[in-house]
Image (cartoon, helix red, strand yellow):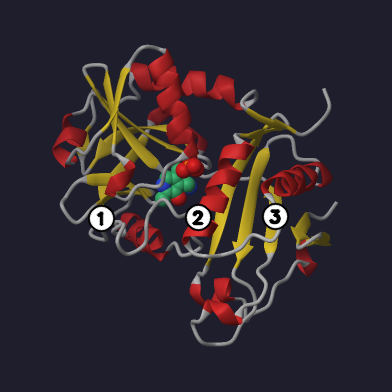
Amino acid sequence: MALQVYIDGDYYSKDDAKISVFDHTLLYGDGVFEGIRVYEGCIFRLRQHLERLYSSARYIMLTISIPLEELTEVVAETVRRNEIRDGYIRLVVTRGEGTLGLSPWHCPKGSIICIADSISLYPAETYEKGLHLVTVPTMRNRNESLNARVKSCNYLNNILAKIEAHNAGCIEALMLDHNGYVVECTGDNIFIIKNARIRTPPTYLGVLEGITRDCIIEIARKKKYAVSEEPFTRFDVFDADEVFLTGTAAEAIPVVEVDKRMIGDGRPGRITKELIAAFRERTTKDGHQVYPS
Ligand code: PMP
């Protein structure tokens, strides 16, 4: 069966799922989105993802034409129609068709698009062996320019960083802010562990408030680890016993080398592995169940 894509109330097969070339999301990256996982028929933290989508839309003054409860059902129905049990959902709200100028008020109605498909981000062996990161020259957007908590369709900042990482032979980039503090990676949040103390950069530095990040913080605190959101520099990363990344697509993944400095003993750390295992256990339970049990 061809993939069924939801656009504004109807379902289209993949080849027929189209929006206008005058949509400002295509012309300017003017829109918002979410990436969401499905685990064994459970849409992981769907409500939290939708709340973030509405918050992002509010920030850019974009009206989502249906309420959150209705959108919940749209997402669930898209998953059911595509018979997805384990997969990835891309939910996009566009600014809509407008003129060639920037002005969003010439776009009377945005579109809601929901795609449910599969995804694999990093090669399977990187979850066992750990990732290598490189710090890139492109800095993460300053909050004063584009608040990183807005999950907007304008990802050029992250894509430039991704290209720089790739040019340096790595698949993910470490991004800093203009003061040299560690912020996040191109599509993942970062955690460091030193003497069993877990740290991740605070959102005010220009960090997307990741839903996987939130979940890992909750799990770690439940396990009685000290977890803090505080600024740190590359010194702390190089000096850490363990480093890992979190993100919907990446899930939770160990990092074993940063800028050619080996992290810890160069293998995924004990606490990292413990947290990843606990996270995996949660994924099938913590969310919206799509199929009747
Ligand atoms: N930071 C950035 C820049 C991201 O794009 C993402 C999502 N891919 C994350 C962090 C992780 O957020 P989440 O856990 O909600 O997917």
Q: Amino acid at mark 1?
A: Val
Q: Is residue 21 left or right of residue 73?
A: left
For label 1, the residue is 136
Element type at mark 2? helix
In the image, residue 123 sits, relative to residue 115, either above or below, namely: above
Count residues near mark 2 (Cα–Cα under 10 Å), then give few for <14, some for 14-19, many for 20+: many
Residue 235 point in image, percent of width and height: 14, 37
Q: Are marks 1 and 3 in contact (CB under 8 Å)?
A: no
Residue 107 point in image, percent of width and height: 61, 78
Mark on residue 114? 3
Element type at mark 1? loop
Q: Residue at x 52, y 58 (%)?
A: 58
Label 1 or label 3, whichever lies nearer to me, is: 3
Name which of mark 2 and mark 3 comes first in the sequence: 2
Name which of mark 2 and mark 1 comes first in the sequence: 2
CB of mark 2 near ligand 1 (< 8 Å) = no
Residue 128 point in image, percent of width and height: 44, 27
Q: Is residue 11 left or right of residue 136?
A: right
Task: Give the spatial CA distance, label 2 vs label 1.
Answer: 26 Å
Count residues near mark 3 (Cα–Cα under 10 Å), then give few for <14, some for 14-19, many for 20+: many
Residue 150 point in image, percent of width and height: 45, 55
Task: Give the spatial CA distance, label 1 vs label 3.
Answer: 32 Å
Q: Is residue 224 left or right of residue 17?
A: left
Q: Amino acid at mark 2?
A: Ser
Label 2 or label 1, whichever lies nearer to me, is: 2
Q: Residue at x 40, y 12 (%)?
A: 223
Task: Give the spatial CA distance, label 2 vs label 3.
Answer: 17 Å
Name which of mark 1 and mark 3 comes first in the sequence: 3
Q: Amino acid at mark 3?
A: Cys
